Image: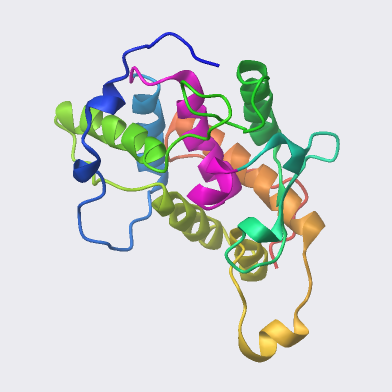
Amino acid sequence: ARGLKVDNPAEAIRPSAIATFKARDRALSPAEIHTFFNALDQTATTSTLRLAVKFMLLTLVRKSEFIEATWGEVNFEAAIWTIPKERMKAGRPHNVYLSQQALDILVAFKTCFSASSYLHPGRYETELPISAATLNRVIDATVKLIRGRGEDFEPFTVHDLRRTASTLLHEAGFNSDWIEKCLAHEQRGVRAIYNKAEYAEQRRAMLQTWADMLDGWIKNGANVVPIRRGVSIA
């Protein structure tokens, strides 16, 4: 199926101009999250792509894991997105426990893209996913807007959202094993042999708290004390 062409400023950004800066340990601070997401809403990019960027930060998944995701992987009733082993870097299926905010975004995607098997298809072909460069274009357009206002804001990529989540969750005192499981990082050595725990309940509660923390920062800035919903961080 094809739709009408709608001008998108992010498309004017050359792929060669995206993520050409040197790799570094880039993690956004709560203040930067506030600045970025409020600026994101002011860009002329499509609303679903703006939601997709937030979805990446909410779920901690890799870019390819989102881009290639299909509705058959999502269980709305159980609030779980199960990524099959064929699409996972470690070759094992991965459960993403969906916060209410992540579920709300998926409902928006389903409403907009009901004819597609992909969570977020490309603009003109409903049976093709968005391109690998699309989300970085949206981020780059937003950073350009912020810097155009005279604010100092370092560029970053979609992958840096995973590092951001890991950094801020660790700083909030959450258990490293829960965070690593959410990131689907492969454990090695003796720990990999003996630690088979999935921490499903803890991860679900942590990701809901994380979503609430993000909403607080986006709305009110960095001076937000997260309210833990009965989650033990030990």
- Magenta segment, principal secondary structure? helix
For residue 28, side relative to residue 191 (left or right): left
Instruction: Determine if the magenta segment contains residue 124.
Output: no
Looking at the image, the residue that sits furthest to the right is: 77
Quarter of image, res 177: bottom right
Percent coordinates x, y for residue 134 in the rendering: 39, 35
- Dividing the picture into quarters, in which one does residue 142 lie? top left
Is 26 drawn above or below residue 1 in the view shown? Answer: below
Taking the spot 27% from the left edge, 62% from the top edge, the residue there is 23
Range of the magenta residues? 43-68
Q: Nearer the viewer, residue 118 or 42?
A: 118
Q: Position of residue 39 (x, y in %)?
A: 34, 26
Q: How many marks?
A: 0
The relative height of residue 32 versus residue 165 in the rendered view (above or below) is above
Residue 143 at x, y = what percent?
A: 26, 35
Residue 57 as seen in the image, left or right of residue 209 = left
Question: What residue is rendered at 62% in x and 63% in y?
Answer: 184
Q: Horizontally, is 19 left or right of 87 in the view?
A: left
Residue name at image x 48 percent, y 11 percent: 3
- Residue at the image point whose x is 77% and y is 63% from the top: 199
